[in-house]
Amino acid sequence: QSVLTQPPSVSGAPGQRVTISCTGSSSNIGADYDVHWYQHLPGTAPKLLIYANSNRPSGVPDRFSGSKSGTSASLAITGLQADDEADYYCQSYDTSLTGWVFGGGTKLTVL
Amino acid sequence: EVQLVESGGGFVQPGGSLRLSCAASGFTFSSYAMTWVRQAPGKGLEWVSTITASGSSTFYADSVKGRFTISRDNSKNTLYLQMNSLRVEDTAVYYCAKDKGLVFQNWHFDLWGRGTLVTVSS
């Protein structure tokens, strides 16, 4: 059971918008620690998608955006494309565990 | 080219040991904290261990504390993970990652390797 809770799967048609939630608690997201998001295709290196809640590294399209409120965060993907199909993970820090934590991951399927 | 390349994975029996390496290139290795993250078969990503840029401080997940040791050789641009008393549940792809961020609690991982597979089985 992950400390950060994500839906196991989401799906959308090409061109649509999807959101992936990441729910934490007062010892991680709610403690005002930043949330970061990664895209991962099995067999490849995970890729940083969003850092510090809402910032995109250079090279990441503005179709990807992040937000954070209270004990939760969200990743939004607009204009869905076939190659967005991947696993997405949120990550933060947990003060109770004194370590960094990941969400359980969400598999995005582009219909 | 900026990259991280892991090596050292393999097959080991329960109770055995293995040392993973991660060779860094294309950036000033000694300026960044580094982290190991693993992914068990069919599971999500799990943070394993982090070491500060100088190597003076180390952090471990409870699941590996006392069994794994993270270290680095800044003269060789290489990160290590010594894994002892291995268990079946340690079976995973192990990734090394470069840390970034101003405050350590807000560190994130902006560069990853492709991983090395560790299989623990009798």
Image: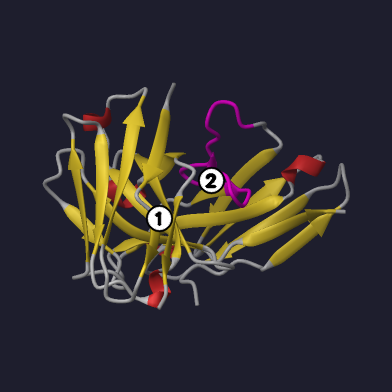
- When asked about the image quadrant of residue A105, the answer is bottom right
How many C-alpha atoms fall within 10 Å of the one at disc 2: few (<14), some, or many (≥20)? Answer: many
Query: Disc number at residue B37?
Result: 1
Predominant SS along the magenta part: loop
Q: Residue at x 81, y 39 (%)?
A: A79
Task: Check if residue A57 falls in the magenta segment.
Answer: yes
The quadrant the N terminus of chain B occupies is top left
User: Which residue corresponds to mark 2?
Assistant: A46
The answer to whether one can see residue A80 in this image is no
Chain on which label 1 sits: B
Q: Which residues are magenta?
A: A39-60
Tell me, for residue B60, which label it has, or none.
none
Q: Nearer the viewer, residue B45 or B41?
A: B41
- Residue A28 is covered by the magenta coloring: no
Give the Cα separation between the discs numbered 1 and 2: 10 Å
Q: Are marks 1 and 2 in contact (CB under 8 Å)?
A: yes
**What is the three-letter code of the residue carrying label 2?**
Pro
Q: Give how far across and how far down residue B62 sits, in percent.
A: 28, 72
- What residue type is disc 1 on? Val
Q: Is residue A83 left or right of residue A41?
A: right
- The residue sitting at 67% across, 58% down in the picture is A20
Horizontal side of A43 relative to B92 (left or right) equals right
Mark 1 neighbour density, 10 Å: few (under 14) some (14–19) many (20 or more): many
Q: Quadrant of the C terminus of chain B?
A: bottom left
- Callout 2: helix, strand or loop? loop
Can the viewer see residue A72? yes
Residue A93 placement: quadrant: bottom left
Task: Find numbered disc 1 in the image and state the secondary structure of the residue it sits on.
Answer: strand
